[in-house]
Amino acid sequence: MWRKSKPYLLLLPATGAIILLFFGGIFDGLLKSFGYFPAIGQTDLNLAAYERLLSSGAFWESLRLTLRVAALSSLLSALIGALVAIALFFLNDAMRTKSPKAWHRLFQLPLTIPHLVAGYIIVLLFMQSGFVSRILAAIGWIDDIADFPVLVNDPFGWGIIFTYAWKEAPFVSLMLYPVLSRIHGSWREVSRVFGAGNWPFIREVVMPVMMPAWTVATFIVFVFTFSAFEVPYLLGVTYPSVLPVYSYQLYTSGTLADRPEALAINMILAAMTILLGLVTYYFSKRWNVLKGWG
Amino acid sequence: MSDLRIIDIQKRYISAQAREENPFMLHPVRLAIREGEFFSLLGPSGCGKTTLLKLVAGLLEADGGELWVGDENLTNVPPESRRFAMVFQQSLLFPHKTIEDNVAFGLKMQKVGKQQRLKAAREMLEHVGLSGFGSRFPDELSGGQQQRVALARALVANPRVLLMDEPFSALDPGLRQEMRELLSRIQKEFRVTVLFVTHDRDEAFALSDRIAVMGEGKLQQVGSARELYERPETTTVASFLGLRNILGGVIENGHFASSDKIMEAAVHLPLSDGDYFMVIRPEAIKASENGQSGHARVRGVVQEMKYGRGIYSLIVKVRKQLLECVLTIAQAEKTAVGEPIDLFVDMKEVWFLKE
């Protein structure tokens, strides 16, 4: 009995802390989003915060921006990441005797840089008085640095999108590369003998093989960018702001009455993340993408 | 006629370590393989047979020479445009594609319509005895079945030449035999030109119309299985074909005397005087009961007896020379390891090499 339950007992402090902090936090947030706030004498549960939120234009504006930023960031990083992974794969194929490790290291570099620092790099590079605009002005492509488009702290969110594309593309490519490296070197030979050039090979073999990992990696990027805070806080505008920033603004606005709405936003973010996970899982099963890789 | 002609194709591997003194080199190879012929490249590992096959496929770039099919020069044509097909040692099926899609891959690359290519794939699967397996995935099939699919994938594209790189070497002996029979039947049915690489003598002998024996990056000899076995041109070829009874000696006035003095006999072939090697096939050595004319007599001691499929294989020590011979069970039962034995060599069955 003791031997059987010993591992569980040893795990108890860790699992206890996770359950208490993670699920406890979510549960507390959920209760508060339902208006349960004993500190100000509110103990009944209602959907008032959700109703207020769903009827406010600011929320929908924020949701639109969040979805746009997350979708474009994940799309860009998925595309760049896949291109980089395929390039590394062919590079490895072409340089079988030499090690293309230096390239790997170069693409791993962005992974080591914190998001906040990446955000600052984008600010320094792409703001109107930044590095890129000064270079373009210096070589005469633009007359004045003010002619450089507003890409940082812009209402569309380009700065945020660029940061995530730069930061997450290597993540996508490094998720894909081990999968691609499982592609048998001889498959390239097989497909060539049977008439497939580079593009048909990528379409028929490389893409289907990397699709499951690609879907999962893109989903992770989407979910992360959908609920991330610091980069949009740094590179976004005050209005409209992405949902996590909007939630923070509401929570710290000074009135306790706004807090259920702030927490309702968090609950909606959590629910959407779970929903997206289920959708991705459904599609990955339906595409049969994992078939035959046992 | 769409004969495959390999004209002085050669390849030198530049070693990763420049210090290496003897980088592998495939010496210029000249071969003509007739349309519909089953041609094997036979040789030990590392002799250059797979290199030659890949050069023909276009998967390796030749340092020199030309490749023709009929009157078309394919030397600079990329492999994807040569309309060849290949079966490898492993089946190398695409795991994410169904069996049907795997078989139809070549046709898809040739832009054949979906209905048509799947129909052709199903028919070809029937030919290799796998009808009804089309919707499965490769990992649901056994090794032998996967190799049948690989064969179907190669044949369905109607290739000008079918290249095969030791396709059955990863299968167990029973399955290998089954696959040989299948391949032989299908090759005759489709009249496809086959260039087959193997290190297995029995496999090459069982399947091929002609065989090229390779060694040390060179073509050693080309001929039918019987020609090679009974008339090897060099001791290297003889040794590779499993002929271990090779005696050095001299022919003088139509009489051969081995240098180790174990055998002296009249030669039945019109050969000039000089130094020769006498190659004796194990079947040409018989256990003697009565003196027979035209046979050379040797006496030795049985060193080893091995039973194999209805016959005994013996190693007999005659002075310092070891001779291999085969005996029937009845003959073998009369002797034992360590006992003396009288052997006769049928001089009509021996072959002489001048080196």
Image (spheres, grey):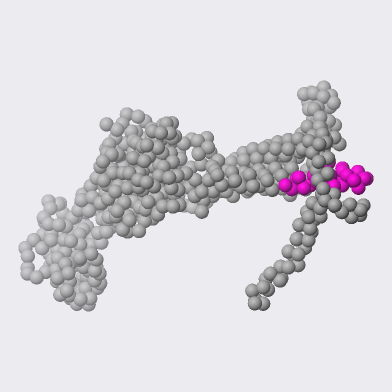
Q: Is residue A244 visible?
A: no
- What residue is shown at x 41% (from left), y 33% (from top)? B115
Residue A261: within the magenta?
A: yes
Q: Residue B121 or B208: which is nearer the viewer?
A: B121
Image coordinates of residue B278 in percent, x first then y, are 20, 58
- Quadrant where the N terminus of chain A lies? bottom right
- What residue is shown at x 24% (from left), y 66% (from top)? B308
Image coordinates of residue A70 in percent, x first then y, are 72, 39
Left or right, A172 with respect to B128, comes to: right
Q: What is the quadrant of residue B126 in the picture?
A: top left
Image coordinates of residue B302 in percent, x first then y, are 21, 73
Q: Residue B252 or B303: which is nearer the viewer?
A: B303
Query: In the displayed structure, would residue B337 be above or below residue A88?
Result: below
Q: What is the quadrant of residue A20 in the picture?
A: bottom right
Q: Magenta region: which residues?
A: A245-271
Left or right, A282 with respect to B263, comes to: right
- What residue is shown at x 34% (from left), y 53% (from top)? B199
Left or right, B172 with respect to A232, comes to: left
Q: Is residue A154 visible?
A: yes
Q: Residue B204 or A128: which is nearer the viewer?
A: A128
**Magenta portion: prevailing SS class:** helix
Image coordinates of residue A19 in percent, x first then y, are 75, 61
Residue B256: within the magenta?
A: no
Query: In the displayed structure, would residue B316 be above or below residue B221?
Result: below
Q: What is the quadrant of residue B339 in the picture?
A: bottom left
Q: Residue A43 or B347: which is nearer the viewer?
A: A43
Query: In the displayed structure, would residue A54 be above or below residue A7?
Result: above
